[in-house]
Image (cartoon, grey):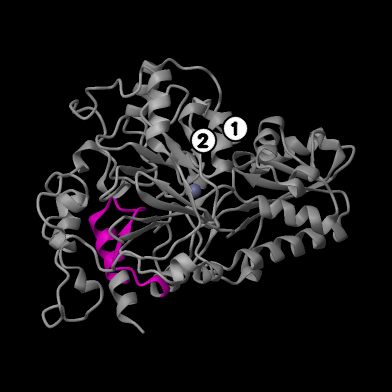
Amino acid sequence: MLTDEEDRSIDDDMDENGFPSLQLVSEEEEEEEEEEETSVRNGNEDPSVGVSQGSFASNFYRSGTDWSCLLESNPQKSKRLKQADLFQVWGFKKATGTSSGSMVSSSPSKEKNKMQSVSLERFNDRMNSKVPSFGKRKNWGGDNRRRICPFYKKIPGTPFTIDAFRYGLVEGCSAYFLSHFHHDHYSGLSKGWSHGPIYCTPLTARLVKMSLLVNPLFICPLELETEHVIKGIKVTMLDANHCPGAALIHFRLEDGRCYLHTGDFRACRPMQLHPLLANHQINVLYLDTTYCNPKYRFPSKEDVLEFVVMMTKKSITKQPKTLIVVGAYSIGKESVYLAISKALGVKIYANSSRRRILLSFGWPELSAKLCSRGQETPLHILPMSSLRPETLEQYLLTYMHQYTAVLAFRPTGWTYSEVTGNQLNLIRPRLSGNITIYGVPYSEHSSFLELREFVQFLRPNKIIPTVNVGNAAHRDQMQSYFQEWLKEQ
Ligand SMILES: [Zn+2]
Protein backbone atom coordinates (compact mmCIF):
# COMPACT_ATOMS: atom_id res chain seq x y z
CA MET A 1 0.00 0.00 0.00
CA LEU A 2 1.33 3.39 -0.87
CA THR A 3 1.19 5.69 2.07
CA ASP A 4 4.02 8.06 1.34
CA GLU A 5 3.75 11.15 -0.79
CA GLU A 6 7.23 10.46 -2.06
CA ASP A 7 6.08 7.16 -3.50
CA ARG A 8 2.84 8.19 -5.00
CA SER A 9 2.56 8.03 -8.74
CA ILE A 10 2.68 11.40 -10.37
CA ASP A 11 -0.77 12.84 -10.92
CA ASP A 12 -1.92 14.30 -14.20
CA ASP A 13 -1.78 17.76 -12.69
CA MET A 14 1.89 17.42 -11.85
CA ASP A 15 4.98 17.65 -13.95
CA GLU A 16 7.53 14.86 -14.16
CA ASN A 17 9.27 16.14 -11.05
CA GLY A 18 6.13 15.94 -8.97
CA PHE A 19 5.59 19.68 -8.91
CA PRO A 20 2.22 21.16 -9.73
CA SER A 21 2.03 21.87 -13.43
CA LEU A 22 0.88 25.36 -14.13
CA GLN A 23 -1.70 24.70 -16.79
CA LEU A 24 -4.75 26.79 -16.11
CA VAL A 25 -7.88 24.88 -15.20
CA SER A 26 -11.29 26.37 -14.72
CA GLU A 27 -12.61 26.20 -11.20
CA GLU A 28 -15.43 23.85 -12.20
CA GLU A 29 -12.97 21.41 -13.77
CA GLU A 30 -10.79 21.68 -10.73
CA GLU A 31 -13.64 20.83 -8.39
CA GLU A 32 -14.44 17.77 -10.47
CA GLU A 33 -10.81 16.69 -10.29
CA GLU A 34 -10.89 17.03 -6.55
CA GLU A 35 -13.96 14.83 -6.48
CA GLU A 36 -12.26 12.14 -8.49
CA GLU A 37 -8.94 12.30 -6.73
CA THR A 38 -8.29 9.25 -4.61
CA SER A 39 -6.80 9.72 -1.21
CA VAL A 40 -3.31 8.31 -1.13
CA ARG A 41 -2.45 8.17 2.51
CA ASN A 42 -5.63 8.71 4.44
CA GLY A 43 -7.77 6.09 2.86
CA ASN A 44 -10.73 7.15 4.96
CA GLU A 45 -11.21 10.56 3.43
CA ASP A 46 -14.60 9.88 2.12
CA PRO A 47 -17.84 11.66 3.08
CA SER A 48 -19.00 8.50 4.78
CA VAL A 49 -16.27 8.78 7.37
CA GLY A 50 -17.28 12.16 8.73
CA VAL A 51 -19.15 11.39 11.92
CA SER A 52 -21.29 8.49 10.84
CA GLN A 53 -21.70 5.12 12.52
CA GLY A 54 -18.71 2.85 12.06
CA SER A 55 -16.51 5.72 10.96
CA PHE A 56 -13.05 6.46 12.24
CA ALA A 57 -14.51 9.30 14.26
CA SER A 58 -17.19 7.20 15.90
CA ASN A 59 -14.73 4.38 16.62
CA PHE A 60 -12.42 6.89 18.11
CA TYR A 61 -15.09 8.34 20.33
CA ARG A 62 -15.99 4.87 21.45
CA SER A 63 -12.44 3.97 22.41
CA GLY A 64 -11.29 7.36 23.42
CA THR A 65 -13.70 8.61 26.07
CA ASP A 66 -11.57 7.21 28.83
CA TRP A 67 -8.13 8.66 28.39
CA SER A 68 -6.76 7.04 31.47
CA CYS A 69 -6.35 3.86 29.43
CA LEU A 70 -3.33 5.59 27.91
CA LEU A 71 -1.72 6.00 31.27
CA GLU A 72 -2.86 3.17 33.49
CA SER A 73 -2.87 -0.58 32.98
CA ASN A 74 -6.06 -0.88 35.01
CA PRO A 75 -8.35 2.06 34.36
CA GLN A 76 -10.91 0.72 36.88
CA LYS A 77 -8.58 1.58 39.73
CA SER A 78 -7.30 4.86 38.44
CA LYS A 79 -8.79 8.28 38.40
CA ARG A 80 -10.62 8.57 35.13
CA LEU A 81 -10.13 11.47 32.82
CA LYS A 82 -13.62 11.61 31.40
CA GLN A 83 -14.74 13.74 28.53
CA ALA A 84 -18.34 14.71 29.01
CA ASP A 85 -19.03 15.61 25.43
CA LEU A 86 -16.50 14.69 22.81
CA PHE A 87 -18.50 16.28 20.06
CA GLN A 88 -18.00 19.53 21.89
CA VAL A 89 -14.26 18.92 22.21
CA TRP A 90 -13.85 18.16 18.55
CA GLY A 91 -15.73 21.28 17.64
CA PHE A 92 -18.87 19.71 16.19
CA LYS A 93 -20.95 21.23 18.95
CA LYS A 94 -20.71 24.45 20.92
CA ALA A 95 -19.95 24.49 24.64
CA THR A 96 -23.11 24.91 26.67
CA GLY A 97 -22.06 25.02 30.31
CA THR A 98 -18.97 25.24 32.40
CA SER A 99 -15.64 23.86 31.41
CA SER A 100 -15.88 20.99 33.86
CA GLY A 101 -16.03 18.50 31.04
CA SER A 102 -13.21 19.99 29.08
CA MET A 103 -9.97 18.27 28.36
CA VAL A 104 -7.91 20.67 30.42
CA SER A 105 -5.27 18.91 32.42
CA SER A 106 -2.83 21.74 32.88
CA SER A 107 -3.50 25.26 34.01
CA PRO A 108 -2.80 28.22 31.76
CA SER A 109 0.80 29.17 31.87
CA LYS A 110 1.56 32.62 33.17
CA GLU A 111 4.91 32.85 31.53
CA LYS A 112 5.39 35.63 29.03
CA ASN A 113 7.00 34.64 25.79
CA LYS A 114 8.16 36.84 23.01
CA MET A 115 5.03 37.27 21.02
CA GLN A 116 4.26 38.39 17.55
CA SER A 117 0.65 39.31 17.26
CA VAL A 118 -1.11 38.44 14.05
CA SER A 119 -4.25 40.41 13.62
CA LEU A 120 -6.44 37.92 11.85
CA GLU A 121 -9.49 40.15 12.20
CA ARG A 122 -7.74 42.97 10.40
CA PHE A 123 -6.49 40.52 7.82
CA ASN A 124 -9.99 39.18 7.23
CA ASP A 125 -11.40 42.66 6.86
CA ARG A 126 -8.76 43.46 4.29
CA MET A 127 -9.41 40.25 2.44
CA ASN A 128 -13.16 40.51 2.53
CA SER A 129 -13.02 43.93 1.02
CA LYS A 130 -10.67 42.82 -1.75
CA VAL A 131 -11.95 39.34 -2.47
CA PRO A 132 -15.69 39.44 -2.87
CA SER A 133 -15.89 35.69 -3.50
CA PHE A 134 -14.73 34.83 0.04
CA GLY A 135 -16.84 32.01 1.36
CA LYS A 136 -18.88 31.84 -1.79
CA ARG A 137 -19.48 28.06 -1.67
CA LYS A 138 -22.50 28.39 0.55
CA ASN A 139 -23.70 24.90 -0.15
CA TRP A 140 -20.50 23.22 0.91
CA GLY A 141 -21.33 20.49 3.36
CA GLY A 142 -24.97 20.43 2.27
CA ASP A 143 -24.06 18.50 -0.83
CA ASN A 144 -23.57 14.80 -0.16
CA ARG A 145 -21.08 14.54 -2.98
CA ARG A 146 -18.65 16.73 -1.10
CA ARG A 147 -15.96 15.35 1.13
CA ILE A 148 -16.35 16.13 4.79
CA CYS A 149 -13.32 17.35 6.67
CA PRO A 150 -12.33 14.52 9.06
CA PHE A 151 -12.32 15.46 12.74
CA TYR A 152 -8.60 14.79 13.14
CA LYS A 153 -7.84 17.67 10.80
CA LYS A 154 -9.62 20.10 13.13
CA ILE A 155 -8.06 21.49 16.26
CA PRO A 156 -10.72 21.35 18.99
CA GLY A 157 -11.64 24.58 20.69
CA THR A 158 -10.21 26.62 17.81
CA PRO A 159 -11.37 27.71 14.38
CA PHE A 160 -8.28 25.98 12.89
CA THR A 161 -7.79 23.10 10.47
CA ILE A 162 -4.55 21.46 9.37
CA ASP A 163 -3.90 20.32 5.80
CA ALA A 164 -7.61 20.45 5.03
CA PHE A 165 -7.83 22.15 1.66
CA ARG A 166 -9.66 19.50 -0.32
CA TYR A 167 -12.94 20.06 1.52
CA GLY A 168 -13.56 23.59 0.27
CA LEU A 169 -15.00 25.88 2.90
CA VAL A 170 -14.87 24.02 6.21
CA GLU A 171 -17.65 25.19 8.48
CA GLY A 172 -16.34 27.05 11.51
CA CYS A 173 -12.82 27.26 10.11
CA SER A 174 -11.32 30.71 9.77
CA ALA A 175 -7.64 29.74 9.62
CA TYR A 176 -6.28 26.98 7.41
CA PHE A 177 -2.84 25.69 8.38
CA LEU A 178 -0.55 23.97 5.90
CA SER A 179 2.13 21.82 7.55
CA HIS A 180 4.33 21.46 4.44
CA PHE A 181 4.43 21.49 0.68
CA HIS A 182 3.73 17.88 -0.22
CA HIS A 183 0.82 17.19 -2.48
CA ASP A 184 -1.20 15.01 -0.14
CA HIS A 185 -1.18 17.89 2.35
CA TYR A 186 -1.85 20.89 0.10
CA SER A 187 -4.22 19.05 -2.24
CA GLY A 188 -7.18 21.32 -2.98
CA LEU A 189 -5.16 24.53 -2.86
CA SER A 190 -5.14 26.31 -6.18
CA LYS A 191 -5.20 29.68 -7.84
CA GLY A 192 -8.91 29.92 -7.08
CA TRP A 193 -8.57 29.39 -3.31
CA SER A 194 -10.81 31.83 -1.47
CA HIS A 195 -11.96 30.09 1.71
CA GLY A 196 -9.71 31.76 4.23
CA PRO A 197 -6.17 32.63 5.26
CA ILE A 198 -3.48 29.96 4.88
CA TYR A 199 -0.86 29.80 7.63
CA CYS A 200 2.46 28.10 6.93
CA THR A 201 6.20 28.69 7.18
CA PRO A 202 7.74 31.37 4.92
CA LEU A 203 9.41 28.74 2.70
CA THR A 204 6.13 26.86 2.21
CA ALA A 205 4.43 30.21 1.60
CA ARG A 206 6.82 30.95 -1.27
CA LEU A 207 6.10 27.56 -2.83
CA VAL A 208 2.33 27.99 -2.49
CA LYS A 209 2.55 31.37 -4.16
CA MET A 210 4.98 30.32 -6.88
CA SER A 211 3.74 26.85 -7.75
CA LEU A 212 0.03 27.02 -7.05
CA LEU A 213 -0.46 30.71 -7.87
CA VAL A 214 -2.60 31.17 -4.77
CA ASN A 215 -3.64 34.79 -4.21
CA PRO A 216 -0.92 36.23 -1.92
CA LEU A 217 -3.63 37.97 0.10
CA PHE A 218 -4.57 34.58 1.52
CA ILE A 219 -1.04 33.50 2.42
CA CYS A 220 0.19 34.26 5.94
CA PRO A 221 3.78 33.19 6.53
CA LEU A 222 4.67 32.39 10.15
CA GLU A 223 8.34 32.48 11.07
CA LEU A 224 9.65 29.33 12.73
CA GLU A 225 10.43 29.47 16.44
CA THR A 226 8.29 32.54 17.04
CA GLU A 227 5.13 32.62 19.07
CA HIS A 228 2.30 34.10 17.02
CA VAL A 229 -1.14 34.91 18.39
CA ILE A 230 -3.96 33.97 16.05
CA LYS A 231 -7.56 34.29 17.22
CA GLY A 232 -6.27 34.49 20.80
CA ILE A 233 -4.39 31.19 20.42
CA LYS A 234 -0.63 31.01 20.68
CA VAL A 235 0.83 29.24 17.68
CA THR A 236 4.46 28.24 17.21
CA MET A 237 5.94 26.53 14.15
CA LEU A 238 8.86 24.19 14.86
CA ASP A 239 11.19 22.47 12.40
CA ALA A 240 9.70 19.06 11.53
CA ASN A 241 12.90 17.45 10.18
CA HIS A 242 10.95 16.45 7.06
CA CYS A 243 11.12 18.37 3.77
CA PRO A 244 12.16 22.04 3.43
CA GLY A 245 9.61 24.30 5.10
CA ALA A 246 7.87 21.47 7.00
CA ALA A 247 6.65 22.37 10.47
CA LEU A 248 5.39 20.82 13.65
CA ILE A 249 2.63 23.13 14.83
CA HIS A 250 2.22 23.83 18.53
CA PHE A 251 -1.01 25.41 19.78
CA ARG A 252 -1.59 26.79 23.23
CA LEU A 253 -5.20 27.74 23.91
CA GLU A 254 -6.28 30.49 26.28
CA ASP A 255 -7.34 27.90 28.87
CA GLY A 256 -3.87 26.33 28.85
CA ARG A 257 -4.58 23.29 26.69
CA CYS A 258 -1.67 22.46 24.38
CA TYR A 259 -1.87 20.53 21.14
CA LEU A 260 0.95 19.43 18.91
CA HIS A 261 0.33 18.54 15.27
CA THR A 262 3.37 16.90 13.72
CA GLY A 263 2.32 17.20 10.07
CA ASP A 264 4.88 14.84 8.53
CA PHE A 265 8.04 14.59 10.60
CA ARG A 266 11.06 12.56 11.50
CA ALA A 267 11.41 12.60 15.25
CA CYS A 268 14.93 13.33 16.46
CA ARG A 269 16.74 14.01 19.72
CA PRO A 270 17.09 17.81 19.30
CA MET A 271 13.27 18.03 19.41
CA GLN A 272 13.42 16.79 22.99
CA LEU A 273 15.41 19.85 23.95
CA HIS A 274 12.84 22.30 22.67
CA PRO A 275 11.41 24.24 25.65
CA LEU A 276 7.86 24.10 24.29
CA LEU A 277 7.98 20.32 24.16
CA ALA A 278 10.19 19.71 27.17
CA ASN A 279 8.41 21.98 29.65
CA HIS A 280 4.71 21.80 28.83
CA GLN A 281 2.24 18.96 28.91
CA ILE A 282 0.79 18.14 25.49
CA ASN A 283 -2.90 17.33 25.82
CA VAL A 284 -3.37 15.91 22.35
CA LEU A 285 -0.67 14.80 19.94
CA TYR A 286 -1.63 14.52 16.26
CA LEU A 287 0.99 12.08 15.10
CA ASP A 288 2.49 11.20 11.70
CA THR A 289 2.14 7.42 11.87
CA THR A 290 3.44 6.63 8.37
CA TYR A 291 5.84 3.97 9.69
CA CYS A 292 4.07 3.02 12.93
CA ASN A 293 4.94 -0.64 12.59
CA PRO A 294 7.87 -2.41 14.29
CA LYS A 295 9.06 -3.77 10.96
CA TYR A 296 10.26 -0.29 10.03
CA ARG A 297 13.66 0.08 11.63
CA PHE A 298 15.58 1.99 9.03
CA PRO A 299 18.94 3.56 9.67
CA SER A 300 19.54 7.20 10.51
CA LYS A 301 19.69 9.72 7.69
CA GLU A 302 23.35 10.32 8.48
CA ASP A 303 24.19 6.63 8.05
CA VAL A 304 22.40 6.50 4.70
CA LEU A 305 24.24 9.61 3.48
CA GLU A 306 27.53 8.07 4.51
CA PHE A 307 26.65 4.89 2.61
CA VAL A 308 25.65 6.80 -0.53
CA VAL A 309 28.88 8.81 -0.49
CA MET A 310 30.95 5.68 0.08
CA MET A 311 29.32 3.78 -2.81
CA THR A 312 29.73 6.81 -5.07
CA LYS A 313 33.42 7.13 -4.30
CA LYS A 314 33.92 3.39 -4.86
CA SER A 315 32.23 3.55 -8.26
CA ILE A 316 34.17 6.61 -9.39
CA THR A 317 37.44 5.00 -8.35
CA LYS A 318 36.58 1.86 -10.30
CA GLN A 319 35.13 3.68 -13.29
CA PRO A 320 35.94 7.42 -13.40
CA LYS A 321 33.50 7.95 -16.29
CA THR A 322 30.45 7.26 -14.12
CA LEU A 323 27.40 9.49 -14.20
CA ILE A 324 25.76 9.75 -10.76
CA VAL A 325 21.97 10.04 -10.76
CA VAL A 326 19.79 10.75 -7.73
CA GLY A 327 16.07 10.18 -8.10
CA ALA A 328 13.62 12.61 -6.57
CA TYR A 329 9.91 13.35 -6.53
CA SER A 330 9.01 16.81 -5.34
CA ILE A 331 10.74 18.60 -2.48
CA GLY A 332 12.71 16.65 0.14
CA LYS A 333 15.82 14.45 0.06
CA GLU A 334 18.04 17.37 -0.96
CA SER A 335 20.64 16.22 1.56
CA VAL A 336 21.35 13.13 -0.54
CA TYR A 337 22.63 15.00 -3.57
CA LEU A 338 24.15 17.75 -1.44
CA ALA A 339 26.25 15.13 0.36
CA ILE A 340 27.50 13.68 -2.95
CA SER A 341 28.12 17.16 -4.31
CA LYS A 342 30.22 18.07 -1.27
CA ALA A 343 32.12 14.80 -1.20
CA LEU A 344 33.06 14.96 -4.89
CA GLY A 345 33.34 18.74 -5.12
CA VAL A 346 30.94 18.84 -8.08
CA LYS A 347 27.87 20.83 -9.04
CA ILE A 348 24.31 19.53 -9.21
CA TYR A 349 22.34 19.45 -12.43
CA ALA A 350 18.54 19.66 -12.29
CA ASN A 351 16.09 20.69 -15.00
CA SER A 352 14.64 24.17 -14.99
CA SER A 353 11.39 23.33 -13.17
CA ARG A 354 13.28 21.70 -10.30
CA ARG A 355 15.94 24.44 -10.22
CA ARG A 356 13.25 27.05 -9.89
CA ILE A 357 11.82 25.27 -6.85
CA LEU A 358 15.22 24.61 -5.28
CA LEU A 359 16.32 28.23 -5.76
CA SER A 360 13.13 29.40 -4.03
CA PHE A 361 14.31 27.75 -0.79
CA GLY A 362 16.79 30.59 -0.45
CA TRP A 363 19.52 28.20 0.72
CA PRO A 364 22.81 29.77 -0.42
CA GLU A 365 24.74 26.50 -0.16
CA LEU A 366 22.30 24.65 -2.41
CA SER A 367 21.74 27.55 -4.81
CA ALA A 368 25.49 27.93 -5.36
CA LYS A 369 25.81 24.29 -6.38
CA LEU A 370 23.05 24.19 -8.98
CA CYS A 371 23.92 24.34 -12.65
CA SER A 372 21.79 24.48 -15.78
CA ARG A 373 23.81 22.31 -18.17
CA GLY A 374 24.08 18.55 -17.75
CA GLN A 375 27.57 18.56 -19.32
CA GLU A 376 28.94 20.63 -16.45
CA THR A 377 28.71 17.97 -13.76
CA PRO A 378 28.57 14.18 -13.26
CA LEU A 379 25.79 14.60 -10.64
CA HIS A 380 22.25 14.76 -12.03
CA ILE A 381 18.82 14.85 -10.37
CA LEU A 382 16.14 13.01 -12.30
CA PRO A 383 12.49 12.24 -11.61
CA MET A 384 12.12 9.02 -9.66
CA SER A 385 10.16 7.52 -12.58
CA SER A 386 13.33 7.74 -14.72
CA LEU A 387 15.27 5.42 -12.46
CA ARG A 388 14.75 2.36 -14.64
CA PRO A 389 17.55 0.60 -16.57
CA GLU A 390 16.00 1.29 -20.01
CA THR A 391 15.46 4.97 -19.26
CA LEU A 392 18.90 5.43 -17.77
CA GLU A 393 20.51 3.68 -20.76
CA GLN A 394 18.79 6.21 -23.02
CA TYR A 395 19.88 9.03 -20.75
CA LEU A 396 23.46 7.80 -20.80
CA LEU A 397 23.44 7.94 -24.61
CA THR A 398 22.92 11.70 -24.38
CA TYR A 399 26.21 11.93 -22.51
CA MET A 400 28.06 9.10 -24.30
CA HIS A 401 31.07 11.33 -24.97
CA GLN A 402 31.58 11.94 -21.26
CA TYR A 403 30.34 8.83 -19.43
CA THR A 404 30.25 5.07 -19.87
CA ALA A 405 28.24 3.98 -16.80
CA VAL A 406 25.48 5.17 -14.49
CA LEU A 407 25.24 4.81 -10.71
CA ALA A 408 21.75 5.75 -9.53
CA PHE A 409 20.15 6.12 -6.08
CA ARG A 410 16.48 5.91 -5.16
CA PRO A 411 16.31 7.52 -1.72
CA THR A 412 13.01 6.61 -0.11
CA GLY A 413 11.81 4.91 3.05
CA TRP A 414 9.82 2.52 0.85
CA THR A 415 12.99 0.92 -0.48
CA TYR A 416 13.42 -0.36 3.05
CA SER A 417 13.54 -4.13 3.22
CA GLU A 418 12.88 -6.21 6.31
CA VAL A 419 15.71 -8.48 5.28
CA THR A 420 18.38 -5.81 5.27
CA GLY A 421 16.86 -3.90 8.21
CA ASN A 422 19.21 -1.13 9.16
CA GLN A 423 22.27 -2.92 7.80
CA LEU A 424 23.14 -0.86 4.78
CA ASN A 425 25.94 -3.17 3.69
CA LEU A 426 23.31 -5.81 2.91
CA ILE A 427 21.65 -3.65 0.26
CA ARG A 428 22.11 -5.15 -3.18
CA PRO A 429 21.83 -2.93 -6.23
CA ARG A 430 19.85 -3.66 -9.35
CA LEU A 431 22.37 -4.27 -12.12
CA SER A 432 21.74 -4.06 -15.84
CA GLY A 433 24.76 -3.77 -18.11
CA ASN A 434 26.48 -0.53 -17.21
CA ILE A 435 23.55 0.70 -15.12
CA THR A 436 23.57 0.23 -11.33
CA ILE A 437 20.56 1.30 -9.26
CA TYR A 438 20.58 1.37 -5.44
CA GLY A 439 17.40 1.74 -3.42
CA VAL A 440 18.46 3.43 -0.18
CA PRO A 441 16.20 3.71 2.89
CA TYR A 442 16.54 7.46 3.33
CA SER A 443 13.40 8.37 5.22
CA GLU A 444 12.01 11.75 6.19
CA HIS A 445 9.41 10.09 8.40
CA SER A 446 10.09 8.61 11.85
CA SER A 447 10.97 4.95 12.19
CA PHE A 448 8.94 2.89 14.67
CA LEU A 449 11.56 3.28 17.39
CA GLU A 450 11.85 7.01 16.81
CA LEU A 451 8.07 7.33 17.16
CA ARG A 452 8.20 5.38 20.40
CA GLU A 453 10.98 7.51 21.82
CA PHE A 454 9.19 10.71 20.85
CA VAL A 455 5.91 9.60 22.44
CA GLN A 456 7.65 8.40 25.59
CA PHE A 457 9.41 11.73 25.86
CA LEU A 458 6.29 13.79 25.26
CA ARG A 459 3.85 11.59 27.23
CA PRO A 460 0.75 13.26 25.79
CA ASN A 461 -2.69 12.71 27.32
CA LYS A 462 -4.03 11.51 24.00
CA ILE A 463 -2.60 10.52 20.62
CA ILE A 464 -4.44 10.84 17.36
CA PRO A 465 -2.76 9.11 14.42
CA THR A 466 -3.03 11.00 11.14
CA VAL A 467 -1.70 8.42 8.67
CA ASN A 468 -2.91 4.90 7.83
CA VAL A 469 -6.13 5.54 9.70
CA GLY A 470 -8.46 4.22 7.00
CA ASN A 471 -8.44 0.70 8.37
CA ALA A 472 -9.93 -0.25 11.76
CA ALA A 473 -7.35 -2.98 12.39
CA HIS A 474 -4.50 -0.51 11.76
CA ARG A 475 -6.07 2.03 14.10
CA ASP A 476 -6.51 -0.53 16.88
CA GLN A 477 -2.97 -1.76 16.40
CA MET A 478 -1.58 1.78 16.60
CA GLN A 479 -3.61 2.58 19.70
CA SER A 480 -2.27 -0.54 21.40
CA TYR A 481 1.30 0.50 20.55
CA PHE A 482 0.63 3.92 22.07
CA GLN A 483 -0.76 2.37 25.23
CA GLU A 484 2.22 0.04 25.57
CA TRP A 485 4.66 2.91 25.09
CA LEU A 486 2.97 5.04 27.71
CA LYS A 487 2.83 2.19 30.20
CA GLU A 488 6.60 1.65 29.93
CA GLN A 489 9.05 3.64 32.09
ZN1 LIG B 1 5.42 15.01 3.53
For this view, does 279 lie left or right of residue 323? left
| Label 1 within 8 A of ligand 1 by Cβ | no
For this view, does 1 lie left or right of residue 330? left
Where residue 161 sits: x, y (%)? 34, 43
SS state under label 2: loop
Where residue 264 sits: x, y (%)? 46, 53
Where residue 462 sits: x, y (%)? 28, 65
Q: Is residue 137 visible?
A: yes
Residue indicated by mark 1: 16
Residue indicated by mark 2: 10
For this view, does 381 lie left or right of residue 235? right
The disc labelled 2 sits on which kind of residue?
Answer: Ile
**Residue 258, quarter of the rendered image:** bottom left
Please report the bounds of the magenta region as a residue range: 457-481
Where residue 407 sits: x, y (%)? 74, 51
State yes or no: discs 2 and 1 in contact (Cβ < 8 Å): yes
Q: Residue at x 19, y 39 (%)?
A: 48
Give yes or no for residue 374 being in the magenta stretch: no
SS state under label 1: loop
Q: Tell me if mark 1 has few (under 14), some (14-19) or many (20+) residues whose alpha carbon lies within 10 angstroms of its own.
A: many
Given residues 339 and 114, the one toward you in this image is 114
* Real-space CA distance between mark 2 and mark 1, rounded to the nearest whole angstrom: 7 Å
Given residues 238 and 64, the one toward you in this image is 238
Task: Count the labels in the image.
Answer: 2
Vertical position of residue 167 compared to residue 271: above or below: above
Given residues 402 and 94, the one toward you in this image is 94
